[in-house]
Image (spheres, helix red, strand yellow):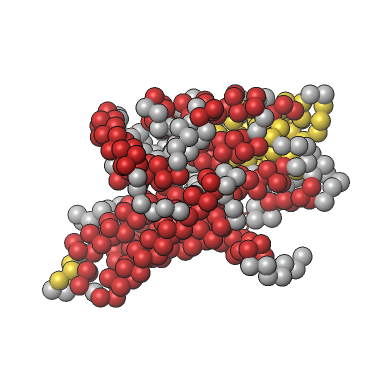
Amino acid sequence: MDLRYSDSDERFRVELRAWLADALPSLPPKPGADDWTARRAWDTRWQKMLFDAGYAGIDWPREVEGRGATPTEHLIFLEETERADAPYVGVNFVGLLHAGPTLIAEGTDEQKKRHLPKILRGEEVWCQGFSEPGAGSDLAALSTKAVLDGDHYVVSGQKIWTSFAHVADHCELLVRTDPDAPKHKGISWLIMPMDAKGIEIQPLRTITGSTEFSQVFLEEVRIPVANRVGAENDGWRVAMVTFSFERGTAFVGELIRTMSLVEEIAALARRIKRGDGTAWDDPGLRRDLGKIAAELDALWALTRRNITQAERGTGVPGLGGSVFKLAYSEVRHRIGDLAMKLLDRAALSFENVGSMESGIHVERWFQSMSISIAAGTSQIQRNIVGERILGLPKEPG
Ligand SMILES: Cc1cc2nc3c(=O)[nH]c(=O)nc-3n(C[C@H](O)[C@H](O)[C@H](O)COP(=O)(O)OP(=O)(O)OC[C@H]3O[C@@H](n4cnc5c(N)ncnc54)[C@H](O)[C@@H]3O)c2cc1C
């Protein structure tokens, strides 16, 4: 990999910066956290603006209306959008970050044509129906069943923790198509239209008060066989492709945002009074923050390597995504803990205390707890790293 930027990379950066400087001030104010209709409209409006300017699907192939950018341009795009504080993927993170990429790798031409341009134009929002009450970490134990009836599957069961289900048009859904096969061999990956008959969505409230998750109940939902991605009963392999994007590249934008968070915490420490000075006078705090900043730099270097390797190879990131996801989750926990220590008693409230903008740090601390659970817990990533990368013996059972 060549770490230097070419003249054409620099031209790309300058053009993108100029476009962002023009586009961002035209955005209306962000809607309230629980105003889901408005949030969907806001997020998809930004997506449409990216599309019209030729920046949507930056690393997606041109055939599906992506930009087909080089790996370096992709990284520049992430750096510059973060530097300008541009919106991130929002409610369509599933469509843009892993369902879309899975269709690119595994979908039929018809599926790609039908969905990918709409995802890029902000016309289609996706959710993920993988987890079930009895199958989280042990995902292959899922029991939502799909029975073939002519040219449709009839699907019944329950999904849980489905982020943004109530604003989604389609769902990447894992179902059991062969109950008699060994558990990994009887699963299929389907595209479920969220307006199909028999779907009931019940929102759940998280510890931060958000209703972004739902339980999704499925009762005899008819899904065309043409909506199956990959062969029948080969859904576990397709799900691994989805995971390689979800763990490997979906957190990259967040990583850059987290680097800014370190700056924010340093600025906060300089404002918080301690004795005759400020919290920033504490060499222990400066050392801890410096170590975190160095780890984030290392993760950024790892990301650059992973993206470059993936885009120059098959386009699908490898198991290295689990290393990234595990290390990133742990750094996020430590950043949260450090912010809580810094805030001291102000960390007890979601509200800002005095003139300090403490509430957002408390909320982020709670959010950081979810990062080591979403897309597979840290324990599961450790198992993957141990067994599938390091070749250690498999866990019993
Ligand atoms: C923010 C967020 C968004 C999410 N969005 C979605 C979504 O959109 N769609 C979706 O389908 N799911 C989603 N999930 C669900 C997520 O994938 C699951 O929560 C996760 O896979 C863990 O499953 P579980 O909650 O059932 O925990 P469990 O599997 O019950 O795990 C409980 C604990 O046991 C540990 N454990 C379990 N098995 C092992 C093992 N073999 N070895 C060592 N330790 C083990 C786990 O690490 C964990 O600490 C989301 C979760 C979060 C937090």
Image vertical order of residue 268 relative to residue 220, above or below: below
Of all residues, the one furthest to the right in this rendering is: 180
Q: Nearer the viewer, residue 332 or 293?
A: 293
Q: In front: 218, or 294?
A: 294
Q: Which quarter of the rendering shows the C terminus? A: bottom right
> Residue at left 41%, top 45%?
72
Q: Position of residue 102 (x, y in %)?
A: 60, 39
Residue 155, percent from left and from top: 74, 33
Q: Tell me which image quadrant ligand 1 sits in.
A: bottom right
Name the residue rendered at 76%, 30% in the picture.
154
Residue at screen point 34% across, 39% down: 8
Does 297 appear above or below 220? below
Tell me, yes or no, if residue 269 can be seen here: yes
In this picture, is 297 found above or below 223? Answer: below
Query: What number of labels is visible?
Result: 0
**Viewer can see residue 219:** no
**Displayed quadrant of residue 168:** top right
Q: What x and y, as percent, mark residue 52?
A: 39, 24
Residue 80 drawn at (x, y percent): 32, 43
179 to the left or right of 10: right
Q: Which of 247/92 is in front?
A: 247
Q: Which residue is depicted at the point 65% across and 27% down?
A: 109
Query: Measured along the vertical axis of the image, is residue 282 above or below residue 224?
Result: below
Horizontal arrangement in the rendering, residue 278 relative to residue 286 (left or right): left
Of residues 298 and 259, the one nearer the viewer is 298
User: Which residue lies most toward the left here?
Assistant: 276
Q: Is residue 181 left or right of residue 52?
A: right
Residue 394: name its quadrant.
bottom right
